[in-house]
Amino acid sequence: MSSRRHDPRWTFALVSAGGVMMTLDVTVVNVALSDVARDLETGLDRVQWTVSAYSLAFGALLLTAGALSDRLGRRAVFTAGMALFTLASAACGLAPDAGALIAARTAQGLGGAMVFAPTLALIAAAYDGARRRAAIAAYALVASAAGALGPIVGGLLVTGFGWRWIFLVNVPIGLLVVAGALRRMPGAAAPDDGRPRVDVPGALLAVGTLLALHYPLVTGPEAGWTAPEVLGSAGAGVLLAAALVAVQRRGGGLVDMTLLRIRAFSGAAVLGFLARLSSLGMLAFLTLWLQSTYGYSPLRTGLLLLPLTGGLLITGLFVNGLQKRFPAHVLVAAGFAAQGLGLLLLALAGAGTGQAVLVTGLALLGAGGAVIFPPLMGVAVGTVPEERAGMASGLTNACYPLGTATGVAVFGAVFAARLDSGLGAGPTAAAPVREAVETGRFDLLAPALRAPATTAFSGAFTAVCLAAALVCLLGVAASRALRPDPGPSGAVREPRPRARAARAS
């Protein structure tokens, strides 16, 4: 094959396009929920499952998809996932009712996991050395920017063309990515013995474990943490996780348990979980606070978040140079520190200190995220054997949606507790008042109740920001795990470089 056919820039472009689509579909739907509910003549509570179904399916399959990509081929899993995601997007856009939309969103999540899981391994195989670090940094920047721009993109599409186009726009893009992957992306090497072995029990246990752990985090805030389905799912998740570990310890299965013994790799997975928990986990509360405080539409709220996107994009331009000068643990600690400071400023903004503090806090939140993720991604695939890169990519990526779901659940509990305390007793404690306040609908309240309700809401948002800042402090401390392991003689053992192999498709 010609070098032009397998130019690594094609791999980067195709993987980035897939990452943008998957990341956008996590956040872009939120701004369309009201329109979907009205058009399909169903309740908003049911339509919210279009968000939950995607997240559950996406998070549940990530680990399995990453491990299978090492067995069956990373390009094959990526391409099949993109094809499924594209078909499911068309089904979403044409859905006649809420049930069909939820089913199609589930299929979208499954396809998204297959696309997202091998991305880091594909980039790591296409580049080496400093070029690999630069490519991973650029990919992290593109994907993060897509997530931050999700509300704006969604607002534009819903306002200009209708909610169905937030899904239909994926179809032509997806078809182009599938065609490009088949023609321009190198295939994967065959397994060691030439036969693609698949650990079916391990795959089923991995999917079941992640699904059971995600479900209570997604449904708990609404159903209640003591609801039977929430407690039952959490208990099943613990049992399935124990069974998965027991099965995989025998070796040769879906997950190579020895990877978890690599301190830097395990640290990267945990830190990715914490980073998503502290940032995207509180993003829903930030958006709700902005809408309620300033009375903006979804599109104007998205525009108000531009300092966050700007901080991310501008800082991201310098991350590759920073990675050449500073080790991963220093950069990650600095990123968590910047996010923590930004969250403290947002807490002050919640207390009414003005828009200058708000803009600075948003910019620091974005800048911190830009610094955290590229080093983590580099460590995740740079400290494991090449033949396990897909598994490492899937395992690391599986921690991201789990961190987001955990953040929403934990901060939701913090928000609710502080809101109850702020509303206190009397007229403000009535159920209709609380329901209006927790969704930021102060216009539904009597004029005499608006001031105390607004104060209680702002106090709850401030509590969420402070809790997220504590998570960032934990991230600063935990970043020490990224220091390279010392060798037997006491010398530092750096990750060994891996040569990029030209692969036959």
Image (cartoon, rainbow, N blue to C red):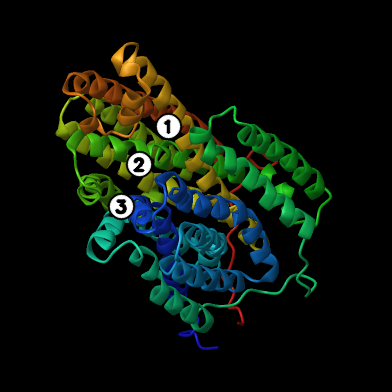
Front residue of 317 and 270: 270
Figure quadrant of the N terminus: bottom right
Could you tell me residue 382's position as x and y percent?
A: 57, 55
Question: Around disc 2, counting alpha carbons within 10 Å, would you say few (fewer than 14), some (14 to 19), or many (20 or more)?
Answer: many
Which of the two discs, 2 and 3, labels the residue nearer the N terminus? 3
**Looking at this rendering, what residue extends furthest in the bottom direction?**
1
Residue 264 found in image quarter: top right
Whole-angstrom CA distance, mark 3 to mark 1, is 24 Å
Numbered label attached to residue 151:
3
**Would you say 74 lies left or right of 192 here?**
left
Whole-angstrom CA distance, mark 2 to mark 3, is 20 Å
Front residue of 415 and 46: 46
Using the image, determine if residue 58 lies above or below residue 286: below
Query: Which residue is at 62% across, 82% downward?
Result: 504
Mark 1: secondary structure: helix
User: Which residue has dot 1 on it?
Assistant: 472
Which of the two discs, 2 and 1, labels the residue nearer the N terminus? 2
Query: Is the residue under label 3 in contact with that under label 2 (CB below 8 Å)?
Result: no
Could you tell me residue 222's position as x and y percent?
A: 48, 35
Front residue of 496 and 85: 85
Using the image, determine if residue 153 lies above or below residue 196: above
Q: Is residue 86 visible in the rendered structure shown here? A: yes
Q: Mark 2 is on which residue type? A: Gly
Front residue of 206 and 367: 206
Query: Is the residue under label 1 in contact with that under label 2 (CB below 8 Å)?
Result: yes
User: Which residue has dot 2 on it?
Assistant: 368
Q: Mark 3 is on which residue type? A: Pro
Query: Which residue is at 55% across, 46% downward?
Result: 399
Q: Mark 1 is on which residue type? A: Cys
Query: Is the residue under label 1 in contact with that under label 3 (CB below 8 Å)?
Result: no
Using the image, determine if residue 482 lies above or below residue 36: above
